[in-house]
Amino acid sequence: MNEITGNEIIHQYLRHNKKFPHVLCPGCGHGIVLGTLIRSIHSLNIPKDDVVIVAGIGCSGRLAVYVDFNTVHTTHGRALSFATGIKMANPKLNVITIMGDGDALSIGGNHLIHAARRNIGVTALILNNNIYGMTGGQSSPATPMGATTMTNPFGQLDKSFDTVELARGAGANYVARGTTFHVKKLEKVLTDAIERPGFSVVEAITPCHTQYGRKNKYKTPVDMYKWMKKAAIPVDRYNELSEAEKEDRLAIGVFVERDQPGFEERYFDLKAKLQAQEEKGGK
């Protein structure tokens, strides 16, 4: 499997005949994230039939349509609910959810919290473009304070969620953040997340020029990638900055690494113990 290189890796995992051309806007980073996900799965030598991609609604939700894995396109905010059921039904599957910031943090926010609390063996890939992109450019829970959107033409008044802190506080086994500019680093943390037991969260910062960038200070998609290049720094360097210096910076890298067993492991261990006790008692 690893003998092929470059774009050939990606092409062998796509549904070419039915689902293309894609619907993504020029400059959108979602295609970069999809390529990163495919290369991560390929590097782990996971057979296609052992992968399940569960996606919600929105621009990010379309990514499940393009890949030749087991895929489920679910209702808005419920990707983790479906993923939990799939993982419990067949724990041997590698279950990965693809969600946008609105999908994961707003209507699906409670599911994210409890998936992390349970530490279910699912990888949550959250594509954060700071906006509801597909439905017209409304503010999302990740829209920065002061940013201009269709629903906040005079500036967003709410404080945005910090996805990393939310996942860390809720108990996820692995929490990381990357950007679509730092592709190799994003690929590394996503590969680690898929391989690690328990619940993993990877936040991918990805640009939406159509609905977010051009309404703010980014005239072109290139401007958004330049911002990522300048703003994103490794988390260890970020932690050395003063609070004032952190305002214009974005920490990337790994924030949480634990090896606690996933919920499905604990469940089936308990089930096996109870069965053994029942059989022993029957004798």
Image: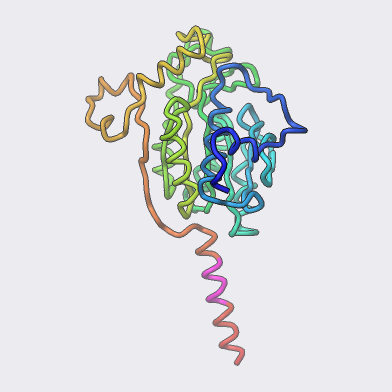
- Image quarter of residue 231: top left
Left or right: where does residue 226 sit relative to residue 41?
Answer: left
Quarter containing the C terminus: bottom right
Q: Nearer the viewer, residue 46 or 134?
A: 46
**Residue 264 at what x, y percent from top left?**
54, 60
**Residue 267 at what x, y percent from top left?**
54, 64
- At a point 57% along the width and 27% down the height, the residue shown is 30
- Total label count? 0
**Residue 274 at what x, y percent from top left?**
55, 76
Q: Is 29 a magenta residue?
A: no
**Residue 206 at what x, y percent from top left?**
50, 25
Q: Is residue 238 above or below residue 138?
A: below
* Extreme residue in the right direction: 18
- The magenta-colored residue range is 268-274
Q: Main secondary structure of the magenta part?
A: helix
- Image quarter of residue 34: top right
- At a point 67% along the width and 45% down the height, the residue shown is 69
Q: Is 273 a magenta residue?
A: yes
